[in-house]
Image: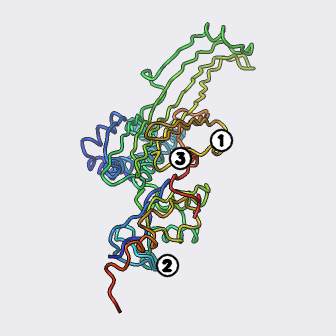
Amino acid sequence: MSLIKERRLYNSLTPDQRRILEEKQIEGNYTPGEWLALLRQLAEYDRHGDAVRKVVKKMGCASGILVVATFIIGIVFETFFLFFIALIIGVVALVLYFVKKRSDLPNKLRRFALPLISILREEMEQGVPLYLRMDFRSGTIKEKETAYLGPDETKARYRRPSNVLKVKETHYTNAWMEGRARLTGGSILEWQIVDNTRQRKITKKGSSGKTKFKTKYKVKTIIDARLGLPREDYALMPGGPTAHQGEKVATRTGEKRNLIRVRRAKQSSTVDPEPDLKEFLDLVAGAFRRVTLTHTGENQL
Amino acid sequence: MTRCAVKRGFFALRDCDDPAANFCNTCSRPMCFQHSVASQAGLLCVECNAREREADGEEDQAEEEYDENWAYGYRHGYYSGSGYSPFYTGHHYDHYYDDYEVRAFDKKEGDDLDDEEEEGDQGFLDS
């Protein structure tokens, strides 16, 4: 782990990879192997960048303590040399931290998108393209804002405790991932992951009489997956397994395919939550559990 | 020609069918070069390697790699942990996958030896 190695990793990125790092968005129709080749190196750079940022953060905290300590020492011994050194280290650490943060990609790439592509590669025929659109920008940027309620509107809409002075509420919709894969046997999997975020900026009077500010988030992540299975091979099972809590299932028989739509909602209180790969696979597996093979008398061997 | 016996896929399994390059030291099944892994136990198929790693209680492979070994290891863990029974859509099922309670097609016409009776003795030579 070093800044030099991180630089080396950055230099080894192709212009396309650097563009993704800068724009934090990507859309394309490549084979899973091509996607992995494109994103693996970015993920490696990001993993290294996260480690560097952690060290820089620790360095910043340590230099903050040093600044205070050397300032006191400076007053006692009437020399501020050490104080200035600590101050310079602190400023460098701060600048480095924010520079690194700007080129950071969320861990969703490393821990969700990459393993998902790796699994889909096994599920797809070689050379078949996989459509993906991913947006790794923050879920609370202006562009993703869908509604704003000022203090007067929130006052009219919600009952609030007497010590709450003001509430501003902003809603964001972040459809950060969309994909379409043609699986072996002619099945088609389409999915979309959307984070609906509610941000509340609360101003209230504390028990000591001081005015306090707080920002609270409520994020509802909706994973919507649609699976189309060829009718000649797969038949919908009447009834099917019970849907999990927070899950909705709809089935339809099309002309060529049986369609199963599964939708799961999950709440969290952190912005841009990292989705769980297993939960996503469970959702798709849930759709596969609702069909049976048409050429079989017995369901299991 | 002997074909690789490893099954590809995740939700639905299918035959790999690439030409076999080796035999697995654990299950003795033929495996292609792509599905072979050199481990402490010798040359294993990616599936036996995943099962051995699980039995040894080894940590998951480094998350950065996400290569085929990782996918097969994850698949084995997923089937064992979630109780999902994958479909099998190939032609050479073997009992290696019985633990997963695979849901499979019936033998298709032409796979059955009985079909050959209709052809009579054509092509057979007297002993």
Judging depth in this view, the residue of A139 and B99 nearest the camera is B99
Query: Dot 3 surroundings within 10 Å: few (below 14), some, or many (20 or more)?
Result: some
Q: Amino acid at mark 1?
A: His
Residue on which disc 1 sits: A244
Query: Dot 2 surroundings within 10 Å: few (below 14), some, or many (20 or more)?
Result: some
Judging depth in this view, the residue of A218 and A79 nearest the camera is A218
Q: Is the Cβ of the residue at disc 2 closer than 8 Å to that at disc 3?
A: no
Distance (Cα) linking label 1 and label 3: 22 Å
Q: Position of residue A6 (x, y in %)?
A: 34, 49
Q: Position of residue A274 (x, y in %)?
A: 52, 41
Q: Which mark is residue B127?
A: none
Question: Is residue A72 in sight in this rendering?
Answer: no
Residue on which disc 2 sits: B26
Work out whether disc 2 and disc 1 sit on a shared chain.
no
Which residue is at 46% across, 72% downward? B114
Q: Nearer the viewer, mark 1 or mark 3?
A: 3
Q: Chain of mark 1?
A: A
Q: Is the Cβ of the residue at disc 2 closer than 8 Å to that at disc 1?
A: no
Is residue A106 toward the left or the right of residue A288 in the image? Answer: left
Judging depth in this view, the residue of B115 and A79 nearest the camera is B115
Q: Chain of mark 3?
A: A
Query: Dot 1 surroundings within 10 Å: few (below 14), some, or many (20 or more)?
Result: few
Q: Position of residue A276 (x, y in %)?
A: 55, 45
Q: Nearer the viewer, mark 2 or mark 3?
A: 3
Residue on which disc 3 sits: A235
Image quadrant containing the C terminus of chain A: bottom right
Is residue A193 toward the left or the right of residue A5 in the image? Answer: right
